Amino acid sequence: MMDALFITLQVILAVIAVYQFVFSLFGMYRKKKKAHFPATKSFAVLVAAHNEEQVVGALMENLKNLDYPKELYDVFVICDNCTDGTADIVREHGIQACVRTNTNLRGKGYAIEWMLKELWDMPRQYDAVVMFDADNLAAPNFLSEMNDDLSGGARVIQGYIDTKNPEDSWITAAYGISYWYINRLWQLSRHNVNMANFLGGTGMCFETKMLKEIGWGATSLVEDLEFTMRSVQKGIYPKFNYDAKVFDEKPLTFKASSRQRLRWMQGHFTVARRYFFPLLWQSIKERNLVKFDLALYSVNVYIVLLTFLMTAIMGIDAAVFNGPNIANIYGYLPLGLSFVAVGASILTFMAAMALEKVTFKKVYAYLILFPIYLISWYPITFYAFFTQNNKQWSHTEHTRVVRLEEVVQSKQV
């Protein structure tokens, strides 16, 4: 019985790995031609902030200087349960500070839901809503790119999430490598074949009419993934804009990174439980590959967990019980095939860096530590499984003050 279970799971995991690898190949190229439209769409730019006095000023300067008609966008900063000078700094820049105090419903999802209700009651209504985090920096063309996509019929759009501090430490370098891979070989690959993309928590754009129709309703620890699933259920597929870049600050230490990723995995388990089977059933009933792909993405956290548990069990079997005593289909395959599989996995990250023309010298030096970052996902996911009912939102402190010109200059060195 145990052997049959192990073989079945190994086959399933192998098929999923091949499926994802094949999809990544579609990210090897970029479609150069795209339609451009006159700047006509108006935007409410929302910035989620909780005690961000150290970094919010740089973003305020950045947003005031976007290459888009100033009369077509307004910035609103959600000062959510702040106990520092975030609101004062925002006001000093001549931007609206929308103060929210609710210690019971804490977290970005609740803050966004509150702000949208405030927004709908304002005299001015906007064509779309854009969302950033307080530690971000946006490329000057960000709103122009969103205008093009909205004018072309898109209703939910995810920009390219880059890293503003990839050379600060080995852990920020690891984040950078991961995000270059995600943008190029996950997001762009699906965009190229007209699949749905997933939202990444910042650099997001939503058509106002669509938001009013379906509501926000995403208040889990991973509100971005939750809204992705909700919109795809309703046949609204998020699109990816490779040219609309937003630069995000990554945690400097392994401890801070682990706390952040634990929160992500806890929320991911919640979303998987809520959306996997409904989306899977819809995909089968409608013969819809897009919904199947997102259903598979929603359950990715369980794939990581299963991989970790099966590896641990086989390791214990070998070390303690002089195994193998458990069926292992990989043991019947040529040894060379295992090296090919591992090599292909590593190659995808290297290929993403090459395709993205990464020039950061320190990042290449930190590559030797990148496997530690990858392996650390396994114990984090394992712990998240047993603490997934913890809904307490944890704040990631941001301290890295960087201007956009510094980011651009560092990428050109």
Image (cartoon, rainbow, N blue to C red):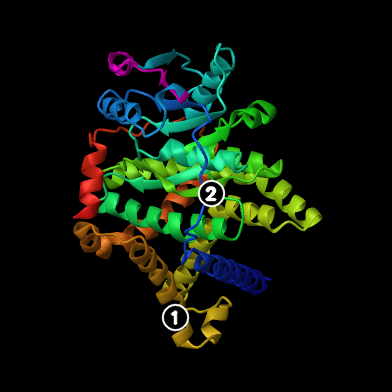
Amino acid type at circle 1 is Val
Q: Give coordinates of residue 184: x percent, y percent.
A: 44, 58
Residue at image x 29%, y 47%? 254
SS state under label 1: helix
Q: Give coordinates of residue 118: x percent, y percent.
A: 54, 15
Residue at image x 63%, y 46%? 237
**Residue placed furthest toward the right:** 285
Residue at image x 41%, y 32%? 68
SS state under label 2: loop
Query: Measured along the vertical axis of the image, is residue 86 above or below residue 30?
Result: above
Residue at image x 65%, y 40%? 231
Amino acid type at circle 2 is Ala
The residue beneath circle 2 is 35
Callout 1: 10 Å neighbours few (<14), some, many (20+)? few
Q: Which mark is residue 52?
A: none
**Between residues 32 and 119, which one lies in front from this camera angle?**
32
Q: Quadrant of residue 342?
A: bottom left
**Where is the N terminus found, in terms of image quarters?**
bottom right
Q: Is residue 202 visible?
A: no
**Between residues 197 and 315, which one lies in front from this camera angle?**
197
Q: Is residue 27 left or right of residue 169?
A: right
Query: Measured along the vertical axis of the image, is residue 287 above or below residue 114?
Result: below
Callout 2: 10 Å neighbours few (<14), some, many (20+)? few
**Residue placed furthest toward the front:** 38
Q: Give coordinates of residue 360: x percent, y percent.
A: 23, 57
Q: Is residue 146 visible?
A: yes
Q: Give coordinates of residue 365: x percent, y percent.
A: 21, 62
CA gap between label 1 and label 2 equals 40 Å
The residue beneath circle 1 is 340
Q: Earlier in the sequence, mark 1 or mark 2?
A: 2
Q: Which residues are magenta?
A: 72-94
